[in-house]
Amino acid sequence: MDMELEAYLRPPEMPMVPYPPKVITLATSGKMIVRQVDRDAVPILLEAIKPTFEVARDYYDIVGVRLYAELLGWYRYRVRDEFCLVGQIDGLLVGIVNTRCYSPELGMSLHTLAIERGLRIGAHLFAAKMEYSFEYLRQEEVLITAESPIGFRRWMIEYGLEKRDGQHELGGATPYALTRELYFRNKSRLVAGERPVPLELMQVAEREIIVASEEDILEKILGVKRREI
Amino acid sequence: MRPVVIAGVGMIPFERRDEDSLVDMLAMAGLKAMDDANLGDRPVDAVYVGNMASGLFNHQVSVASALVDRLNLMPAAADRIENGPASGGSAVKNGFLAVASGYCDIVLVVGGEKMREVIGPKATDIVACMTHPNAEYIYGVTLPALAGMFTRLYMEKYGVTREHLTMVAVKNQENGLLNPYAHIQMKITMEGVLTHPQAHVNSPVVADPIHLYDCCPVSDGAAAVLLTTEDIANELKRPIVTIAGVGQATDTHTLQERSDPTDLKAVTIASQKAFSMSGIKPKDIDVAELHDAFTILEIAESEHAGFFSKGQGAKALAAGETQIGGKLPINPSGGLKARGHPVGATGVAQVVELVWQLRGEAGKRQVKGAVNGFSLNFGGFGNNVIAFVLRSKS
């Protein structure tokens, strides 16, 4: 690699304080660890995203391929100031979220991918990335768009987001904004999690990001297990 | 009246079924019931379809006519029966009357609804069309709103607590795990949806005091039963499960007009009629399928149907009497809470579950030695209720 040219191609990086991990007790009593991952984790995340590429249901295909590209771009230093949080239950990867910092003041929420469904995993992880933007990165506003009806209900309706002029970086529907004021108004209702994470739970999460088989991922997303009845 | 036998039952898994149309689902369930009955080439005299709102959900009406054509059952008579969430129960009742009266010998009853074609808030709005247009709907009243107000009153009057409501949800979702046809296949815990300091994020308020996990899901699905005479059932060599009792009763359209809104008179009267006709008493029932669209309803219905005195349903629940293996298992299928509630299908699905239980074919959720079963299909907010008592003669 020509590192001289590479130096031109790599975007500069804004320093970010780390996101402290937390544990969320789910409706099942399962303990979901939400933690930040660095670039090294990206290859295993990409493996988990691949099975969604042909799942049209709930726009998983669009979310999947775009998230894949965003994480790959970050991994290979072609996307600026991105962060990624994951959700794990007993080490198993159950969801991924990412955001790009457009500036120190403005976050650009990118994608939320729930692999396990029916437990508000996506809602919990979305709330976590907003928590990171407002409480740790101290941003003033995060721009949000939705590609699926579920996303629209979870973000625009549940948080009562404010409409904004212009475009979101994803180039989709009219952007909405979560402001600091809106975030803190909704926090007690929508943001869960306890810190510090007990050591034994954290060790399991950090030891390995376990990715379910392609068949299991599709079954979780599509709910097709029982079609033989 | 002639005895009426349920010779065949069929059902498709309740879930979100994007790729199936409503008529597809009705046909699949109907074929299963006819196959289960060993019907062969015998002609079906009539088809009754329980469906609440295909015109609104799917922009399709006359679904009974479409179904007889799809199943090649012409020239069988065909009617769609609409009675809100009790449409399925009403369809079974009409099928029962057709056979019992001698008007028909073989009747196929199918209940179905495809609700996930619209988004959740729209589905809630369509279901809310059953409320009074001028006294309820225009003020934003939905079924969860009515259930919230009813729950608050019931809690105050009878000491029901949110712990009791959550016990219903936990029990029925656990039962749903034993039922491959159930929409919700997930065990929840008291900690996860009630007692943990952050459980309110997992189970947010829908209509206080009702939370997310107090509500049934919005589902697609269909279920079917084949009704006939005892003689024909014997020829078909199927186990004999009879509809021993049928009861139906109505109440005021609006909840506010009832002298005591916590008194579900139509449930009491419909149940009494069904028990009276069957000669079977509540204490003789081995398994019950109640209409738990909201958790409070399982408790309230178990009292109004005569299984427990007022105020004792929650105590029986807490004592484990309504679990599988308890004194009176309620909703071993998972009920509406876990099996799902495609509104037109529910009343038929309840009867299908009872038949499986009374034949000993309910698999891991089997109630041992079940002979007598009871189902209750709750239309409106208790303004049109249908009850059945089923008996196994095999």
Image (cartoon, coloured by chain):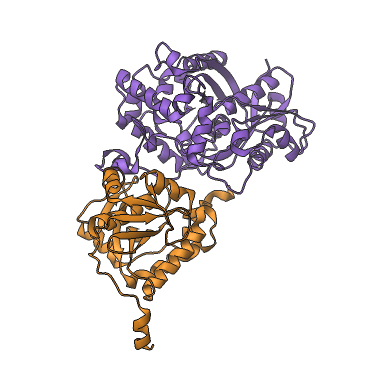
Residue A229 location (% of width, % of height):
58, 47
Residue at 51% from the left image edge and 44% from the top image edge: B180
Residue at 39% from the left image edge and 32% from the top image edge: B323
Residue B303 location (% of width, % of height):
40, 19
Residue A82 location (% of width, % of height):
34, 66
* Residue nearest the observer in this picture, A46 or B25: A46
Residue B130 at least partly seen: yes
User: What color was chain B assigned in the picture?
Assistant: purple
Residue at 40% from the left image edge and 22% from the top image edge: B300
Is B376 situated above or below B69? above
Q: Which chain does orange denote in the image? A: A
**Quarter of the image that includes the N terminus of chain B:** top right
Image-quadrant location for residue B68: top right
Is A204 situated above or below B373? below
* Residue nearest the observer in this picture, A20 or A89: A20
Residue B330 at least partly seen: no
**Quarter of the image that includes the C terminus of chain B:** top right
Number of callouts: 0
